[in-house]
Amino acid sequence: QVQLVESGGGLVQAGGSLGLSCAASGSISRINSMGWYRQAPGKQRELVAVITGAGFTNYADSVKGRFTISRDNAKNTVSLQMNSLKPEDTAVYYCNCNTGVFRREYWGQGTQVTVSS
């Protein structure tokens, strides 16, 4: 079992910046990749960014060049720095990880990010 606890988020004006952080606890030695997803009202949850244990990253096209994902394996945390925020970035952001050979997924409780125009 892995527990993910997110922090950060909030309300920001368009063009501003916010940072999200997620701390993992539990069976952390089995964690493979970690990432961030988001879900806007009336829309499906979508991948924002993911980072492997080796530091390889992948981003949604909509956030490339604006968001940066990072991971601290020693502290078992994953962070998302969001710059040049747009109103369409408004969503609940969820921390995610998968573990072990079968890549069982775990989710955080979600944190709201609201970007005003």
Image (cartoon, helix red, strand yellow):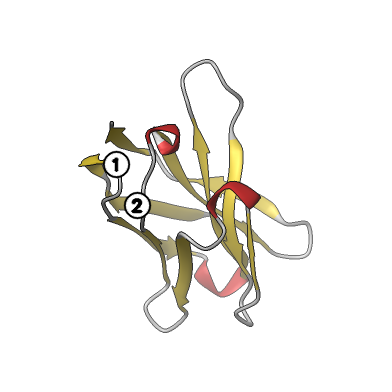
Q: Residue furthest top?
A: 42
In the rendered image, residue 107, in percent from the top left (x then y), is placed at: 51, 44
**Which of label 2 and label 1 is nearer to you?**
1
Kindly identify the residue that appears in the image at 36 percent across and 53 percent down.
84
Q: Amino acid at mark 1?
A: Ala
In the rendered image, residue 68, in percent from the top left (x then y), is placed at: 46, 66
Q: Is residue 66 left or right of residue 50?
A: left
Q: Circle 1: is it few (<14), some (14-19), or many (20+) Cα within 10 Å?
A: some
Kindly identify the residue that appears in the image at 46 percent across and 60 percent down.
67
Q: Is residue 106 left or right of residue 86?
A: right
Secondary element under disc 1, as helix, strand or loop, is: loop
Question: Up-down: is 48 above or below 42?
Answer: below
Q: Residue furthest right?
A: 102
The residue pinned by badge 1 equals: 14
The answer to which of 29 and 71 lies nearer the viewer is: 71
In the rendered image, residue 96, in percent from the top left (x then y), is placed at: 54, 51
The answer to which of 87 and 8 lies nearer the viewer is: 87
Kindly identify the residue that appears in the image at 46 percent across and 19 percent down.
41
The answer to which of 74 and 115 lies nearer the viewer is: 115
Query: Which disc number belongs to residue 5?
Result: 2
Question: Up-down: is 50 above or below 105?
Answer: below
Q: Is residue 14 left or right of residue 92?
A: left
The answer to which of 103 and 39 lies nearer the viewer is: 39
Q: Is residue 10 left or right of residue 46?
A: left
